[in-house]
Image: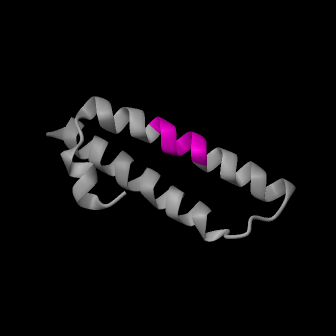
Amino acid sequence: MKKQEIKELSVEGLTEKLAEYRKQHEELKMAHFVTPLENPLQIRKVRRTVARLATELTNRENQ
């Protein structure tokens, strides 16, 4: 997700997307342990998206 897309989400939307991407990250990691992924850079992209979502959620909670 792009930064602009994240800013447009509500707090509830951020929480839902964060849970969704965390689950996807865990699934990708497990799949990569069992059989190497064709594109292991997917894991990095999802991890960074999780970080972006968590950062935005924290920023909104602190305001």
Image spot of residue 47 (x, y percent):
52, 57
| Residue furthest right in the image | 34
Image spot of residue 40 (x, y percent):
67, 68
Q: Going 26% across and 53% down the picture, which residue do you hit? A: 5
21 with respect to 37 (left or right): left
Q: How is the image coloured?
A: one colour
| Residue furthest front in the image | 38
Q: Going 59% across and 64% down the picture, which residue do you hit? A: 42
| 11 shown above or below 50 | above
Q: Going 59% across and 45% down the picture, which residue do you hit? A: 24
| Residue furthest left in the image | 63
How many marks can you see?
0
**Residue 35 lies in magenta, yes or no?**
no
Q: Going 45% across and 51% down the picture, which residue do you hit? A: 50
15 with respect to 38 (left or right): left
Q: Quadrant of residue 43?
A: bottom right
- In the rendered structure, which segment of residues is drawn in magenta? 19-24
| 60 shown above or below 25 | above
Image spot of residue 12 (x, y percent):
29, 29
Q: Observer-nearest residue: 61 or 21?
A: 21
**Residue 20 lies in magenta, yes or no?**
yes
- Mainly helix, strand or loop, the magenta region? helix
| Residue furthest top in the image | 12
Q: In what quadrant of the picture does the C terminus appear?
A: top left
Image spot of residue 28 (x, y percent):
67, 52
Q: In what quadrant of the picture does the N terminus appear?
A: bottom left
